C-alpha cells in the first residue's frame, strides 16, 4: 500500500524507517511537546510494535514513513490508531524531522491520512491530541479542518512535568 501526493509518498513502516524513527524519538528538541525522549531500547521496542501486521480490527498503530518523492529523503512519520471500532473513530499523530518542518510536508501527509481514514477505511471521525505549547501542530490541525474540542488539564507528563493537551476532531460530515 502506498498513499501519494505530488511531493510525498506514505508507505507502511519497514526497516528503512528505523533510523529516522529512533532519531526523532530520542531527540529532546523534536520530543519537547510530544513525550519524554526514549532511550535506544525504548525506541527500538516502539518501532517493533509499530511494524507489526495491521488490519482494520487491530488495536495498534498503523504507521507510515513519509518520503519526499523526488529525492527519496525520509521526512518523518504519521500514523493512525482506531480507538473505537464501534463508533469508527481513529486517532492520528505525526513527527517531522526539524529540517523538513514548515515546508508543508506534514500537511500533505495529514491530507493523505484523512482521505485514507474516511474513504478507504470508511471511518467516521479522526482525532488528534497535542500539547497546548505545540503551536506548529495545533495550527496545522486547524488549517487542515480539525476543530478544537477540548483542553485536558495536566493530561500528559513530559520530562517530569505535567502538560495540558488540546484534543482535536474531524468528522466525516465536516468534509
Image: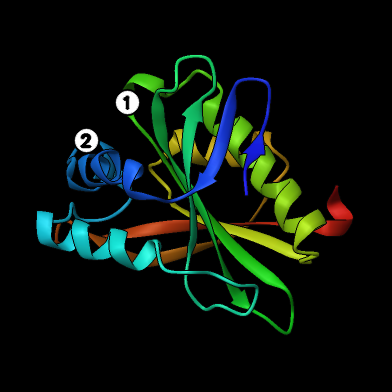
Secondary structure under the numbered disc 2 in the rendered image? loop
Observer-side mark, 2 or 1, equals 1
Mark 1, Cα crowd under 10 Å, few <14 / some 14-19 / many 20+, is few
Which numbered disc covers residue 29? 2
Label at residue 13: none
Residue 98's disc is: 1
Camera-side residue of 88 and 20? 20
Q: Position of residue 27 (x, y in %)?
A: 18, 40
Marks 2 and 1 in Cβ contact (< 8 Å) = yes
Residue at 62% x, 60% y is 127
Identity of the residue furthest to the bottom in this view: 86
Q: Position of residue 152 (x, y in %)?
A: 46, 65
Q: For this view, does 173 lie left or right of residue 136?
A: right
Residue 157 vs residue 113, the one in the foreground: 113
How many residues crowd mark 2 within 10 Å: few (<14), some (14–19), many (20+)?
Answer: few
Which of the two labelled residues, at mark 2 and mark 1, occupies the earlier sequence position? Answer: 2
Q: Quadrant of residue 4?
A: top right
Q: Is residue 51 left or right of residue 66?
A: left
Residue 118: x and y, percent? 78, 57
Check the image and report above or below for 55 versus 175: below
User: Residue 125 falls in which quadrant of the image?
Assistant: bottom right
Q: Secondary structure at mark 1?
A: helix
Amino acid at each position: 500500500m502506498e498513499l501519494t501526493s505530488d511531493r510525498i509518498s506514505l508507505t507502511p513502516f519497514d526497516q528503512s524507517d528505523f533510523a529516522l524513527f529512533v532519531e526523532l524519538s530520542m531527540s529532546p528538541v523534536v520530543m519537547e511537546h510530544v513525550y519524554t525522549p526514549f532511550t535506544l531500547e525504548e525506541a527500538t521496542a516502539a518501532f517493533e510494535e509499530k511494524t507489526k501486521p495491521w488490519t482494520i480490527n487491530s488495536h495498534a498503530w498503523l504507521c507510515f514513513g513519509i518520503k519526499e518523492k523526488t529525492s527519496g529523503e525520509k521526512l518523518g512519520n504519521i500514523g493512525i490508531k482506531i480507538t473505537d471500532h464501534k463508533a469508527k473513530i481513529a486517532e492520528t499523530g505525526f513527527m517531522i524531522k526539524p529540517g523538513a518542518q514548515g515546508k508543508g510536508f506534514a500537511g500533505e501527509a495529514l491530507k493523505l491520512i484523512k482521505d485514507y481514514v474516511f474513504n478507504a477505511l470508511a471511518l467516521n471521525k479522526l482525532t488528534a491530541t497535542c500539547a497546548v505549547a505545540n503551536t506548529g501542530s495545533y495550527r496545522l490541525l486547524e488549517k487542515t479542518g480539525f476543530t478544537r474540542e477540548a483542553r485536558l488539564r495536566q493530561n500528559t507528563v513530559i520530562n517530569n512535568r505535567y502538560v495540558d493537551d488540546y484534543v482535536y476532531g474531524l468528522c466525516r460530515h465536516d468534509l
